Image (tube, rainbow, N blue to C red):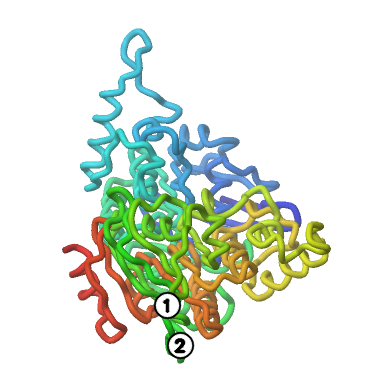
């Protein structure tokens, strides 16, 4: 890719970028959110058209005007955000655009399902090909995306944050697949904020910052500290910030909550000024439990008490009235109004906060609120009027956090809050969690990253197959102790 420049309204996402990738290698691209990594790969895949520059494959100049042309040239992209139709089955999504038919034009459902199952078996997946996509978790959706890309036998496979919602075991399995693809002569372009993955598999590393490639070197000639400093242009704190607060009285009590077969008889207490971690493997029921508490799904049994009083949370509006907010794991589908502006996304859950005379929205209040949180959370945007869809994944995540900060909820459920976020932004969110706790807010933290749970939680509840399997104090938390309960 030579001299690639791409602009969006008010933003130069790529500025004369040149990237050279050798055949049969694993080439990593790292950078902060908003650095332009995903944009560069979308230009390669035909999603975006660059204002200037050219693309050469095997030395020949090519024109990639859409995804189909990219696929015909042997390029396959696994997007950072899953792109599937929830109302269709896993098999239907897998073969979207190239359905297999028998003679006479009859769809070969059995053949397609068997083909999907074969790919899943090779990858060690247990996902039912007949399931609707709406019935599987975010992590399972990501796994389907990975399998779909690999099945196309592409020569160049771009993986944009492929492990962002996978467990450690699933991540190791994927890295083994990437290594296997390399031995088959495939070329892998790998984007991840998890630098341990980058150094585990990469031959070359390119660092991107502010829409430009800052440096490219063999992975063996770079260190983690060097990569981080090149990414952010400064030295960055990567440890978990110390929290010196002591949890207070019980603010939320959940008694024997169940949700059909997904959540079964879960009870817990959340204290004021506490970070309570929820651990478990994919399918453990953590997200399903959180959705039930937040009113996004119907509770079939159980009681929820806030400040000792039983509350009925039949929907998310009732949850917000009860001072509960939720940062969902899928920001694209359930966290944001992508076509709305940043300011509208921030104020949407607390319109009373920008009203004057009871009913009329006050534009100044709305702009002031948006500017406050854009500054506080360091959201990279040229304007409060920028649409959310034009932000990087990490900045989209920050907008959702800003929404709940403006709503001033007492209890905030954070489901994978640092998924797809770079090391610098992660530390900022950790500091923000500590600030919220210091203000007396209470956090339920769901994370697939055990170091994050251990580093940030005061206590951790472990779940397995929808049930609560145990609780560990800060002193008892180790990866081994958590995993022992998570698999039991």
How far is mark 1 from mark 2, CA to CA?
10 Å
Residue located beneath label 2 in the image? 243
Sequence order check, earlier mark of 1 and 2: 2
Query: Which class describes the residues within 10 Å of circle 1: few (<14), some (14-19), or many (20+)?
Result: many
Quarter holding the C terminus?
bottom left
Name the residue at 70% across, 57% down.
344
Q: Classify 422 as above or below 17.
A: below
Q: Pointer 1: what residue?
A: 275
Above or below, comparing residue 65 to residue 422 in the picture:
above
Instruction: From the top left corner, tell me how far across and down residue 482 is, in percent.
Output: 24, 72
Residue visible at 29% across and 64% down? Answer: 280
User: Compared with residue 330, is residue 374 higher up or lower down, i.e. above or below?
Assistant: below
Position in image of residue 340 (x %, y %): 68, 51
Residue 155 percent location from the top left of the image: 39, 42
Residue depicted at 26% across the width and 24% down the height: 111
| Residue 363 placement, left or right of 64 | right
Provide the secondary structure element on which disc 1 rests: strand
Q: Quadrant of residue 198?
A: bottom left
As drawn, 64 above or below 427: above
Q: Residue furthest left?
A: 488
Number of labelled discs? 2
Q: Which residue occupies 25% across, 79% down?
A: 478
- Point out the frontmost of discs 1 and 2: 1
Q: Position of residue 131 (x, y in %)?
A: 32, 37
Neighbourhood count class around disc 2 (C-alpha, 10 Å): few under 14, some 14–19, many 20 upward = some
CB under 8 Å between callouts 1 and 2? yes
Task: State the residue in front, 34 or 152.
Answer: 34
- Is residue 34 visible in the rendered structure shown here? no
């Amino acid at each position: 890719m030579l001299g690639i420049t791409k602009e969006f309204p008010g933003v130069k996402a790529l500025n004369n970028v040149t990237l050279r990738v050798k055949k049969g290698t694993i080439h990593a691209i790292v950078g902060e959110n908003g650095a332009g990594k995903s944009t560069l790969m979308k230009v390669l895949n035909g999603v975006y058209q660059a204002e200037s520059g050219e693309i050469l494959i095997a030395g020949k100049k090519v024109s990639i005007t859409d995804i189909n042309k990219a696929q015909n040239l042997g390029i396959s992209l696994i997007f950072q955000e899953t792109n599937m139709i929830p109302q269709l089955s896993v098999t239907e999504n897998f073969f979207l655009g190239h359905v297999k038919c028998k003679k006479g034009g009859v769809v070969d459902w059995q053949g397609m399902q068997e083909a999907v199952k074969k790919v899943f078996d090779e990858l060690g997946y247990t996902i039912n090909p007949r399931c609707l996509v709406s019935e599987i978790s975010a992590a399972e959706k990501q796994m389907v995306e990975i399998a779909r890309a690999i099945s196309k036998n592409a020569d160049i496979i771009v993986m944009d944050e492929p492990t962002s919602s996978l467990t450690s075991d699933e991540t190791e399995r994927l890295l083994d697949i990437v290594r296997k693809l390399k031995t088959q002569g495939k070329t892998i372009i790998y984007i991840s904020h998890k630098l341990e993955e980058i150094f585990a598999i990469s031959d070359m590393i390119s660092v991107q910052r502010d829409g430009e490639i800052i440096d490219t070197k063999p992975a063996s000639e770079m260190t983690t500290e060097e990569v981080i400093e090149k990414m952010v242009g400064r030295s960055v704190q990567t440890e978990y910030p110390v929290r010196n607060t002591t949890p207070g009285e019980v603010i939320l009590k959940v008694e024997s909550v169940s949700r059909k077969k997904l959540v079964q008889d879960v009870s817990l207490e959340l204290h004021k000024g506490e970070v309570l971690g929820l651990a478990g493997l994919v399918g453990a029921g953590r997200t399903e439990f959180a959705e039930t508490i937040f009113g996004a799904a119907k509770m079939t049994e159980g009681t929820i008490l806030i400040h000792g009083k039983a509350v009925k949370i039949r929907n998310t509006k009732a949850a917000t009235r009860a001072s509960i907010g939720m940062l969902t794991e899928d920001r694209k589908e359930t966290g944001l109004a992508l076509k709305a502006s940043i300011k509208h996304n921030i104020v949407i859950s607390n319109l009373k906060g920008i009203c004057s005379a009871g009913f009329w929205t006050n534009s100044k209040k709305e702009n002031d609120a948006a500017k406050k949180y854009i500054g506080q959370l360091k959201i990279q945007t040229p304007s409060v009027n920028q649409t959310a869809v034009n932000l990087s994944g990490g900045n989209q995540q920050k907008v959702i956090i800003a929404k709940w900060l403006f709503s001033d909820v007492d209890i905030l459920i954070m489901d994978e809050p640092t998924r797809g976020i770079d090391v610098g932004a992660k530390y900022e969110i950790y500091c923000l969690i500590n600030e919220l706790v210091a203000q007396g807010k209470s956090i339920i933290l769901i994370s697939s990253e055990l170091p994050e749970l251990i580093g940030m939680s005061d206590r951790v509840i472990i779940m397995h197959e929808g049930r609560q399997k145990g609780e560990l104090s800060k002193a008892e938390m180790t990866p081994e102790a958590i995993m022992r309960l998570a698999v039991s």
